[in-house]
Image: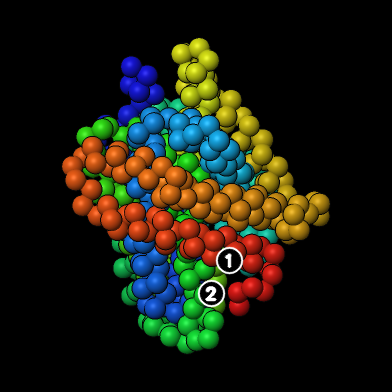
Amino acid sequence: MEQQKKGQWGNQFGFLMAAVGSAVGLGNLWAFPYKMGKNGGFAFLFIYIIIVAFVGIIITITELGIGRKTGKGVVGAYRELGKKFAPIGWFGVISPFLIMSFYMMLGGYTLKYMIANLGDIFGASWGYQGAGMETAEYFQAFFSNQLETVIYTVIFVLLTAAVVRGGVSEGIEKFSKVAMPALFFMLVAVIIRSVTLPGALEGLKFVFEPNFEVFKGSGWVNVFAAAGGQAFFSLSLGMGIMVTYGSYLKKEEDLKLNSIVIPIADTIIAVMAGMAIMPAVFAGGLEPAAGPGLLFVTLQTVFASMGAGGPIFGFVMYFLVFIAAITSSISLLETVVAVVVDMKIEKSKEFNKKKITFWCTAAIMAEAIFVSLDGLGSHGFPQIFGQSTWLDSMDLVSEGVLMPLSALLTAIICGWVLPEFVTDEVELNGKFTWKKFYMFCIRFVVPPVMILVLLGQLDSFFKLGIFG
Ligand code: PHE
């Protein structure tokens, strides 16, 4: 049987670890805590949870359903929905492909910082301290060093490929079953250390204190757009990942349960990240930030100023970030590989996944090297789509346009055009108890929210000033 050959999850726990591993990534660690703090604390969390319930869970079950029903990668799956929908499937290959160009590079950064802190533990000259630089200067020196970033990027790509090459249950599932619980325990350890630092309370206040001011006037639209965009990226939606992972699900698995557990787990980890990171930032008397600056400058400043225990804390933290990043990059690569596997099956019924992984990896390595060479815009490379770094250019096309568009179109198809396609599949595992809720959301809630997210993304990339 074709399905057997393509691989299947061994059990539900394994699937969940892989899917949560995809969802939990850099987005949870470096964007969520900051966005929550800036957009109203608990008030933001409240909106975020509503969006996760009415949009996140709905798109998750839709994508898993499409995947399991068709048993195909994203292009084949959308083609089964209807020939004319195949282009949406292609969006689902292009997005992960583009995201990998910078995600692999950032994964490489986490390796660099793991090693820098490891060096400090041993007082070695190759550690961070040995370089004798301020953290901002150190980061700048690293990301603009083309040879070094390329080397780390290549290592990260190869590690990702090694897991994907192992296959669905023997590679991805096995790895995730160990890595994700490890991430969770490290996160708990970091939280304990972080909240017991003197001055930590300010950080918790920054993340959690409810602030209703941000909703004033048209402010709520910004909060909604921020929460929507974050939820969407954080849950790895709109890019074929859940379709692909769903295609490896056994028919007896309960889609309803899985599609609730993944978003809840992702949200819990995001909130925990806030408790791990911001108290340390404030304890160090530093300004909260988002993005690479938070992870690689602000946090490293905290570790560097903590005395003897700092490097250990730092090593654990970057190891955690590395796991979060690699389980996400694995899902990205698998999505692209799965499409090529389908093509081979269609042509000749035979495929060699290891070979396919090799060629996909080669292509991804090439683009990731290009983005690494740009060094976050430090070498004066030509701007693409008006963005100051190639990372942003790639992100614009994928996260800014294709992903929200794909989710929007998917909702229209599964809500209005083929309303039974997903619900029939869900009902294979017993009554779809919240079918009415599902139909209501996919028809009336998801499309307007995705339009808002799309506008919000374009606004932030092009600084259009639509949202404040
Ligand atoms: N969800 C991951 C995160 O939060 C990122 C990601 C997005 C991974 C899309 C795969 C696909 O960082």
Q: CA distance from mark 2 to mark 1?
A: 8 Å
**Disc 1 target residue:** 456
- Residue at (42% x, 36% y) in the render: 244
Sort mark 1 into few (<14), some (14-19) or many (20+) by Cα contacts within 10 Å. many
**Answer yes or no: do the residues labelled 2 and 1 have beta carbons within 8 Å?**
yes
Q: Give the quarter of the figure containing the N terminus.
A: top left
Q: Is residue 28 above or below residue 91?
A: below
Mark 1 C-beta to ligand 1 under 8 Å: no
- Residue at (23% x, 37% y) in the render: 428
- Residue at (57% x, 31% y) in the render: 361
- Residue at (28% x, 56% y) in the render: 436
Q: Residue furthest front?
A: 417
x and y percentages locating residue 422 in the rendered image: 35, 42
Relative horizontal placement of residue 425, taking residue 400 as reference (left or right): left
Residue 134 quadrant: bottom right
Observer-nearest of 144 and 215: 215
Q: Is residue 326 visible?
A: no
Element type where label 1 sits in the image: helix
Observer-nearest of 102 and 336: 336
**Disc 2 target residue:** 222
